[in-house]
Amino acid sequence: MTTTYGPLAIWAVVLVVGVLTFGIRYSFIYLLGHVDGMPPRIERALRYVPAAVLAALVAPSVLDPGPTVAATLFDGRLFAGVVAAGVAWATENMFATLAAGMVTLWGVTFLL
Amino acid sequence: MPPVPDDLRTGVRAGLPLLLGVVPFGLVAGVASVDAGLSPVQAVGLSVVVFAGASQLAAVDLLATDTPLAVVVLTAVVINLRMSMYSASIAPYFESFRRRWEAACAYLLTDMSYALAVAEFRSDGPTDRRWYYLGVAVPMWLVWQVATAAGAVLGARIPDRWGVSFAVPLVFLALLLPELSDRPRAVAALVGGSIAVVGAGWPLNLGLLGGALAGVAAGVVAEGRTAS
């Protein structure tokens, strides 16, 4: 799908996300000397942000619940996702994961 | 030409193997951006201004489906919240830098530059921290920009039926797997992913935000259970 937002909206997103991201990166580097590090409760919660967000981003792209269990499970994207997850687990290599996932998806799409 | 400081060179050498991972990630970010309808200039602008791959991918993914802009921004920023931990952890080592160097080093702070630099700084050697950090971080920045630009130019020529946009979740998957190192993190991922699947059709992309927040909460609860 392609966005219908115009250049102004896109540049606004770029700028706002960029400024806020820089603010996050600079926050404690700037604040040091004013505060004593991060409150422990927040630090604890932040540890789970990557796992939770990344899983929430991945899951809907590989698992698309269909009308039946079979329709849900016999899906090229799910199959490719499972293969890629196995490769990611074994190699922790971005390139190998991408290659395994894409080749599997193409295999399923073009051969079956 | 002035001589290249040794510690800069040490930093560059330490970061080299990771650059191999930056290339495909950057290519995907470029391809995904033009796929979503951004111009190549906007794609590179996004990479230069934001310089945070996972949040860039999430932002263009949501832009492509015309998600409300506030949700696009909020999602991208939530993904980058983890960097506040890096900021807190690396701050003491940057304390002797001048303000403008602190700001430059903060801009270059990524998962990889943080991990490499902190490992080196903790060993408490005689390394010049600023040169070492720049040696690690600047090549990553350069490679990221070149890779996204290449992806943005190439991306426009790849036919739709190749399903290249599937590379986006694959990148997230490659980043996710090493995160699942303990039970609370696995619980956070399981809850976050499940709610996102169930809520895939919810308005304002609330499935993603709800999944992320519920996942974090579940991780904290699971940690409490493990500890007691």
Image (cartoon, rainbow, N blue to C red):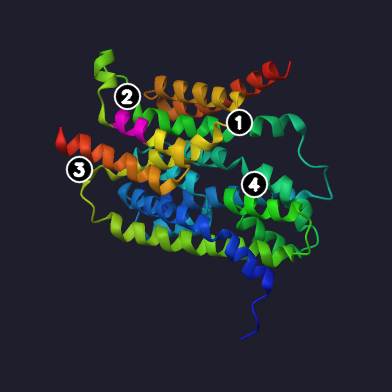
Q: Name the residue under label 2.
A: A64
Q: Is residue A79 magenta?
A: yes
- Residue indicated by mark 4: A24
Tell me the CA gap for discs 1 and 3.
36 Å
Give the distance between the C-alpha atoms of the residues marked 4 and 3, in whole angstroms. Answer: 38 Å
Q: Position of residue B27 (x, y in %)?
A: 38, 54
Read off the magenta span. A77-83
Amino acid type of the residue tagged 1 in the rendering: Tyr
Question: Is residue A66 shown above or below B103?
Answer: above
Q: Position of residue B57 (x, y in %)?
A: 43, 45
Q: Pointer 1: what residue?
A: A48
Q: How far apart are marks 4 and 2 (CA)?
A: 34 Å
Q: What element carries label 2?
A: loop
Mark 4 or mark 1, which is nearer to you?
1
Say whether mark 2 and mark 3 are on the same chain: no
Going by the numbered disc 2, the residue's amino acid type is Asp
Q: Which amino acid does label 4 sit on?
A: Ile
Q: Do labels 4 and 3 touch, CB within 8 Å?
A: no
Q: Which residue, given by chain and number where applicable, does mark 3 sit on? A: B161
Left or right: where B4 falls relative to A40: left
**Mark 4 or mark 2, which is nearer to you?**
2
| Residue A42 percent location from the top left of the image | 71, 32
Q: Which of B45 and B169 is in front in this view?
A: B169
Whether residue B95 is visible, yes or no, is yes
Q: What residue type is labelled 3?
A: Arg
Q: Which chain carries label 4?
A: A
Q: Nearer the viewer, residue B81 or B41?
A: B81
